Amino acid sequence: MFDMPLLARHKVRFIGEKVAVVAAEDPDLAEEAVALIAVEYEDLPAVFDPPAALGEDAPVLHADPGAYAFAPKERPHPNVQSVLRYRLGDPERGFREAAHTFEHTFRTPRAHQGYLEPTAAVAGIDPDGRVQVWTSNKMPFRLRELLAHATQLPIERIVVNPCPIGGDFGGKGSLMDVPLCYYLARATGRPVKMVMTYVEELTAGNPRHASVITLRSGVTADGRIVARTARA
């Protein structure tokens, strides 16, 4: 679901969400330019726990989530981003046959992948209008599709040059700063490089979500698992 703007407008939904972008000849000049940008924030109510985000009184992150491209039809709560269901066999019958039933709930915290190389990207525009991209991304063809959608450019005008990405572990499969590099390159007429600091990685990167997983298991007297349901 395409629910994340390139730069936040009117509403910022998490601490690391970007609100402005600058380009400069060197990092020191860029830091100076950033320091001149003043943003006024008004604190909004927040939730930090998946079950709390599904409560009746939970703050709603997106006012009209169904309006986004590829929004799922099933939405038991406005804060639900997607619903996936899998079923194999007859768990109800298995629980009836079970001699013992156990239920456990497991919680995992939000976690960053911890790769040594931060996310980085370079974008430039050829004289013929082709966009050249170099980035630490594991899915170059998907990146090309997403960049075409984000910039409204014909996909054949975008060339993604694969690079060694170092570590990934699920964290380097999205656009990240590539569209911002493109728009800065278009504005300046020069290639633009953006490299995340580790503060930015930890606040605006692609960490693994926190989770709450409840497993209910049915076991026969001789120890065979005959039923299991999971809610994550």
Image: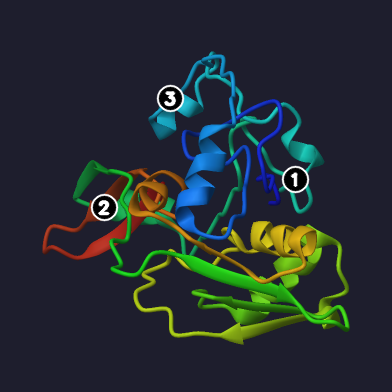
Query: Label 3: which residue?
Result: 52
Is 78 on the left or on the right of 218, as rendered?
Answer: right
Upstream in sequence: badge 1 or badge 3: 3
| For discs 1 and 2, the disc positioned in front in the rendered view | 1
Could one spot residue 231 in this view of the protein? no
Q: Give the residue at x 21% y 44%.
A: 102
Q: Earlier in the sequence, mark 2 or mark 3?
A: 3
- In the rendering, at what x and y percent does residue 230 appear? 38, 50
Query: How many other residues sit within 10 Å of disc 3, few (<14), some (14-19) or many (≥20)?
Result: few
The image shows residue 169, relative to residue 74, as above or below, that is: below
Real-space CA distance between mark 1 and mark 2, rounded to the nearest whole angstrom: 32 Å
Disc 2 is placed on an element classified as: strand
Question: In terms of depth relative to the viewer, which is nearer, 33 or 80?
Answer: 33
Can residue 65 be seen from the camera position used here?
Answer: yes
The amino acid marked with disc number 3 is Ala
Neighbour class for label 1 at 10 Å: few (<14), some, many (≥20)? few
Q: From mark 2 to mark 3, how far is it between C-alphas?
A: 28 Å
Nearest to the eye among marks 2 and 3: give it.
3
Residue nearest the viewer, comparing 95 with 87:
87
